[in-house]
Amino acid sequence: MATQQGDVDELFDVKNAYYIGSYQQCINESQKVKPSTPEKEIERDTFLHRAYIAQRKYAVVMDDIKPSSPAELQAVRMFAEYRSNESKRDAIVAELDQKMSKSVDAANTTFLLMAASLYYHESNMDAALRTLHQGDSLECMAMTIQVLLSLDRLDLARKELKKMQEQDEDATLTQLATAWVNIAVGGEKLQDAYYIFQEMCEKYSSTLLLLNGQATCYMAQNRWEEAEGALQEALDKDSGHPETLINLVVLTQHLGKAAEVTNRYLSQLKDAHRTHPFLRDYLAKENEFDRLSMQFAPTATA
């Protein structure tokens, strides 16, 4: 059935699948949809290639996006190159810093999101926030909330959420951001967050992002066995998903499982996700503990 231009976003299914973490569905929808304008075609392609990045298929993105591709897609390629090539990361960050020091096209939302994502992976939260504040899209605001919550700035995250709700309260991104803020608030808000994830699972599909959201709600309520069920379902979908593995590390500790069970998940993280912010922080603490242990170790006396 024909719809009037502007009434419905023709890329809704593509974007929505990406937002809830259903990346293969996003790819499938991208390949089915026939955009009505060149601008919509570029937007579709940015979500298609971002979904490939989420699946860690960096080579596909690098091969598809050429030097002649539009600026939005170049930004996606930059992030794919950053994620895929550890030896080039410093050079890519330096080049991005140079771009950010000049006038940036704030209308290029994809560039702002990719630049902020890169800074986030570098644990440079100030730069990520400065970048995101140049945009006014729901996605920029949603990512701002993620960064603010990682800094324990719930007060500022709430203000950003209010702006999202004023712009579009029913949007998937706004609902997800509401759940993230509710988790940070805790208490009875945890159940509200759980219901948001559950409703999306029922309406769309139970993705890794949504299952980990549910598991986080359960863990914050000390409902460890239910959390284990959600995480096991997530593990069955992707045994190498970093957030699932991180949550399982936490869960197994609280359930008092054997040390080798926790170590197995940590080993998987170390094998496949050595540059993940959680693991970088964990390894830094591990090294610091080893250093202090050596410092205070008993010494042999004559």
Image (cartoon, rainbow, N blue to C red):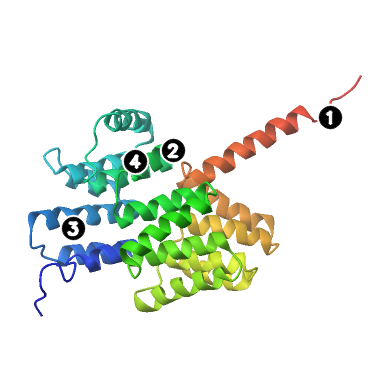
Confirm or deny contact between disc 2 and disc 4 (CB under 8 A): no
Give the number of the mark in front: 3 or 2. 2
How far from the left and from the top, in percent, is residue 136?
A: 29, 51
How far from the left and from the top, in percent, is residue 199?
A: 42, 76
Reading the image, the residue beneath label 4 is 131
Furthest residue toward right: 302
Tell me which label, 2 or 4, sits earlier in the chain.
2
Amino acid carrying label 2: it is Asp
State how far apart marks 2 and 1 are (Cα).
Answer: 42 Å
Label 1: element kind: loop
Confirm or deny contact between disc 1 and disc 4 (CB under 8 A): no
Label 3: element kind: helix
State how far apart marks 4 and 3 are (Cα).
Answer: 23 Å
Q: Residue at x 36, y 43 (%)?
A: 116
Give the number of the mark in front: 4 or 3. 4
Reading the image, the residue beneath label 2 is 126
Q: Residue at x 15, y 53 (%)?
A: 42
Reading the image, the residue beneath label 3 is 44
Amino acid carrying label 1: it is Pro
